[in-house]
Image (cartoon, coloured by chain):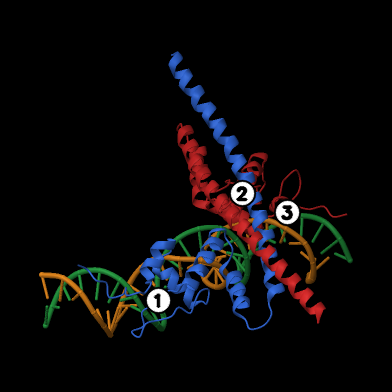
Chain colours: A blue, B red, C green, D orange
Amino acid sequence: MVYNQYRGDRVTIKEVSEQFGLTKDTLRYYEKIGLIGPIGKTSRGIRDFKEQDLKRIEFVKCMRSAGISIDVLIHYMQLFDSEDNTLEERRDLLINQRRILKKRIEDMTKALKRLDGKINMYDQQVLDQFLESGEK
Amino acid sequence: MVYNQYRGDRVTIKEVSEQFGLTKDTLRYYEKIGLIGPIGKTSRGIRDFKEQDLKRIEFVKCMRSAGISIDVLIHYMQLFDSEDNTLEERRDLLINQRRILKKRIEDMTKALKRLDGKINMYDQQVLDQFLESGEK
DNA sequence: GCTTGACTTAGAGTTTACTCTATGGTGTAC
DNA sequence: GTACACCATAGAGTAAACTCTAAGTCAAGC
C-alpha cells in the first residue's frame, strides 16, 4: 500500500492543483507574487493548504477566468489583508472591475452573434453546394 | 487651407486608425502578419485602404475584442483567400470558436454575478459602518 | 542502498500581442 | 529653406501571465 509522505492530514499542492485545474507552478507563482498565501509549510518545508487558502484560490480562479488582471487581484487582496478599514476602497475596486467586465461581456456577445450569423451563412452555402452537386 | 498630401481619394492609415480605434502601428502589424491586406499602395508607397480592407478590419476588430486569437484569425483569413473550396473548414473553425467564446461568456457571467454578490455585501457593510458611527 | 516520485527554490525562458525607436522620404506653410 | 506633419520600413523592446529548468531534499519500495 502506498502511503504518501506528503499526505498526513495535509492538503498538498498536487491535490489543490487537481482540484482547481491550475498547475503546481501556477499555484507557487501565485503565492510568490502575493496573490494567495503565504501558504503554511510543514517542518520540512512542504506546503499545507488550509480551507482559507482554498477559498481564496477558488475566488482567484473565478476572477482570472473572467480576465481580471493579476495586478488588480493582488491589489484587492492587499486591501483585504490590510489592518486599515478598506471596505469602501474594496467596494469601489469591485464596482470598477464589474463595469469593465460587463463591457467585455457585451463585446463578446456581439462577436458571438456575429459568429452565429456567419455560421448560418456557411450552413446555407454548404447546403447549396450539396444540392448543386446532386443535380449534376 | 490644409490640403493633405495623403488624401486625394485615398483612405489613409490615419483615417482608418481613427475610425476603428486601432493604432497605426497595429494596422501595419496586422498587415505584416497577414491578418489584413496586403493593402494597396500609391506610387510613393503610401497605403490606400479600400472598402474591402475596411470590412476586414472591422471584422478583425470585433473578433479581437472578443478575445479570439490572432493565429486563429490568420488561419480563417487564409482559408477565406484560398483558391480551394474551404467553406466547410471555415464553418467548422467558426463553430469551434463559437463554442470557446460561449464558454468564456459563461465564465465571465459567473464572475459578474460573484462580483455583484460581493458588491452588495460591501454596500451593506459600508451602510452598517455609517449607522454605527451615527449612533455614537 | 539505490531508484522512484513527490516536493522545494531560484531564476531563466516562452507566448501573445502589440508598441516603440531609428532612420528616412515627401509635400505644404511661413 | 526650414519647420511641420504626415508617411514608410526594419527590427528592437515591452507587458502579462505563466511555464520550464536545474539542482537539491526526503521517504517508500525493492
Indicate whether B114 appears above or below A54.
Answer: above
Disc 2 to disc 3: CB gap under 8 Å: no
Q: Which mark is residue A48?
A: 1
Estimate the x, y position of residue A59 in percent, counting from the top left. Answer: 54, 65
Disc 2 element: helix
Q: Position of residue C26 (x, y in %)?
A: 71, 56
Task: Residue type at mark 1: give it.
Answer: Asp
- Label ID, residue A132: none
Q: Chain of mark 1?
A: A
Q: Nearer the viewer, residue B36 or A111?
A: A111
Crowd class of label 1 (few under 14; some 14 to 19; many from 20; radius 10 Å) = some
Tell me the residue that label 2 is attached to.
A108
Identify the element where label 3 is drawn: helix
Mark whose residue sits in front, 3 or 1 = 1
Locate residue B123 relative to residue A7 in the image: left or right.
right
The image quarter containing residue B127 is: bottom right
Taking depth in this image into account, of B77 and A78 the one nearest to the observer is A78
Q: Amino acid at mark 2?
A: Met
Chain letter of disc 3 in the image:
B
Residue at x 81%, y 78% (from the top left corner): B135
Q: Which residue is mark 3?
A: B18
Q: Residue at x 50, y 43 (%)?
A: B76
Q: Chain of mark 2?
A: A
Instruction: Say whether disc 1 or disc 2 marks the residue closer to the N-terminus.
Output: 1
Quarter of the image with the C terminus of chain B in it: bottom right
Whether residue B119 is situated above or below residue C27 in the rendered picture: below
Left or right position of C13 against A37: left
Q: Identity of the amino acid at label 3?
A: Glu
